[in-house]
Amino acid sequence: MLNLRNVASGYGLSQVLFGISLEIDEGEVHAVLGRNGMGKTTLVRTLFGQLPLQTGSVHFSGQDISGWASDRIARLGVAIVPEGRQCFPNLTVLEHLTAFADQRNPGMHAGWDARRVFEMFPRLRERASNLGNQLSGGEQQMLAIGRALVTNPRLLILDEATEGLAPKVREEIWHCLAQLRREGQTILVIDKYVERLIGLADRHTILERGRVVWSGASAALAADRELWHRYLGV
């Protein structure tokens, strides 16, 4: 579904990514790992069209989307839960879930709407009339996930999925992602909790200083603790 080939990108004259190649198959959960500052968010921004490619290409479902604008990529069925959540402070929970509703994955058996999001996150139902800036950090993260899901994406990207959340809220997010995997949702997830990602993801890519230093299946990552210490600081 997603194919990055020899992607280089950065900010102005500062190069951050160096020859990144990565593939995600349909229905797969793929985790990108690495310490802070290793290029994970830059990778997400580049494939989503928020940063220009310096070299390389990005293909989605066989179509070259290199250089496309973010809104055009989104309409293909790519949705992002951004780092920092970025909920609209002056929209209610329900307005978020209504304004972004779309059907960008016609092959889905059961589409996502506000009702299904409220079933996934009952706390959001209780806060349906609250504005974005009246929510806790955990509630905002739930809303950011729900906002992405109601577009019915073909590919869901989560940047720092559980960063800064209380343990109870993190568990709700992991439960949500596990359910989405069972339903066949294609996911690219960035997070630091290696143990949980091993149980969730099919494959993993580790970044170090903007380069891919390891890529493989969950079983291989689970068996090599030296990788954890060398590249992830675990």
Image (tube, rainbow, N blue to C red):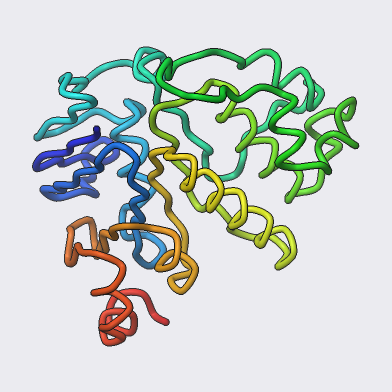
Q: Is 194 on the left-hand or right-hand side of 147?
A: left
Nearest the viewer among 15 and 128 is 128
Q: Is 167 on the left-hand or right-hand side of 31?
A: right
Nearest the viewer among 92 and 126 is 126
Question: What is the quadrant of residue 231 in the picture?
Answer: bottom left
- On the image, the x and y values in percent for residue 215 come to 19, 62
Nearest the viewer among 13 and 157 is 157
Q: State the residue lying farthest toward the front.
A: 109
Question: What is the quadrant of residue 38 in the picture?
Answer: bottom left
Nearest the viewer among 132 and 187 is 187
- On the image, the x and y values in percent for residue 173 come to 63, 53
At 70% from the left and 41% from the top, the residue drawn is: 120
- On the image, the x and y values in percent for residue 112 come to 60, 25
Q: How many marks?
A: 0
Q: Is residue 117 above or below residue 140?
A: above
At 64% from the left and 33% from the top, the residue drawn is: 146
At 18% from the left and 58% from the top, the residue drawn is: 211
